[in-house]
């Protein structure tokens, strides 16, 4: 099946610092979705990227889809403690292929 | 408030027990899924049901048996599980039977399963 690699696995940042997680695939993706899972919670859909080079923003979050549609990134500007959680990318083919996730810890 | 409800939230069972996990979606979606989430592993797709028919079974051991009596309900029947089956079991639904565009997954809160 399709493999989606996500880095880093863990990230600790001081509150106010920026954070980026990367999602990489060896094959071209149709589209990519991002999810956030708070500690003790369930994954919640954040956004979907479809077009090559697409950039979408949600307040302090910026999502980008690579030109070759093989990678994607999520960037958080000026992290807050509410950003704590695990961020997953999911590539879609005939099913969803989830990355391993990046666990973000924000130190107040 | 999630539109996907899972019960129970926590379950402890012995290896010889039989138990069932229940999932109900109130979103009018056409597809439902069971995922397994273990520590340090990607979300693992177990089963997919589309319009009440099973369309995907990712080589899941027969000790896990799904049931989808209608488009709103999904069960996972458990029998003679192993300790390594301990994990968070997540139910999800999506509008379209083909995942992706305009059809994100909506997850329930999950059942935390411990097999002793």
Image (spheres, coloured by chain):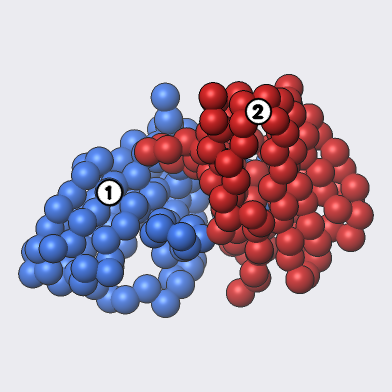
Snapshot quadrant of residue A98: bottom right
Picture layout, residue A95 above or below residue A19: below
* Chain letter belonging to callout 1: B
Instruction: Provide residue B86's location: percent of width, then percent of height.
Output: 27, 61
In-front residue for pair B64/A61: A61
Residue drawn at (72%, 52%) of the image = A22
Asked if disc 1 and disc 2 are in contact, CB closer than 8 Å, the reply is no
Task: Name the element at disc 1.
Answer: strand
- Report the disc number at residue A73: none
Q: Mark 1 against mark 2, which lies toward the viewer?
A: 2
Name the chain under label 2: A
Left or right placement of residue B1 versus residue A106 in this view: left
Give the labeled residue for mark 1: B112
Residue beneath the point at 31% across and 62% down: B66
**Which residue, given by chain and number where applicable, does mark 2 sit on?**
A79
Q: Position of residue B112 (x, y in %)?
A: 27, 49
Front position in the image: A62 or B96: A62
- The letter of the red chain is A
> With B13 as the anchor, is B95 left or right in this view?
right
Residue A77 shows in the view: yes
Q: Picture coordinates of residue B85 (x, y %)?
A: 28, 66
Residue at position x 77%, y 70% from top? A27
Q: Nearer the viewer, residue B6 or A69?
A: A69
Residue at 71% over, 56% down: A23
Quadrant (top left, top right, bottom left, bottom right) of the N terminus of chain A: bottom right
Chain in blue colour: B
Q: Residues within 10 Å of mark 2 (few under 14, many from 20)?
A: many
């Amino acid at each position: 099946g399709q493999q989606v690699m996500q880095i880093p696995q863990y990230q600790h940042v001081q509150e106010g610092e920026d954070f980026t997680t990367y999602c990489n695939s060896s094959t071209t993706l149709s589209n990519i979705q991002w999810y956030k899972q708070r500690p003790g919670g369930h994954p919640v859909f954040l956004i979907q990227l479809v077009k090559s080079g697409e950039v979408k923003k949600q307040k302090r979050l910026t999502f980008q889809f690579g030109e070759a549609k093989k990678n994607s990134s999520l960037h958080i500007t000026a992290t807050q403690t509410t950003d704590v959680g695990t961020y997953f990318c999911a590539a879609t083919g005939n099913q969803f292929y989830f990355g391993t996730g990046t666990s973000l810890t924000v130190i107040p | 408030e999630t539109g996907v409800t899972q019960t129970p939230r926590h379950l402890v069972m012995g290896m010889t027990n039989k138990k069932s996990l229940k999932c109900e979606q109130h979103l009018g979606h056409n597809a439902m899924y069971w995922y397994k989430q273990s520590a340090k592993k990607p979300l693992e797709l177990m089963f997919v049901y589309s319009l009440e028919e099973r369309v995907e079974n990712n080589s899941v051991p027969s000790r896990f048996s799904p049931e989808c009596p209608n488009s709103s309900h999904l069960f996972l029947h458990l029998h003679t599980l192993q300790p390594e089956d301990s994990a968070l079991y997540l139910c999800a639904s999506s509008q379209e039977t083909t995942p992706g565009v305009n059809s994100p997954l909506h997850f329930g809160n999950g059942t935390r399963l411990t097999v002793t």
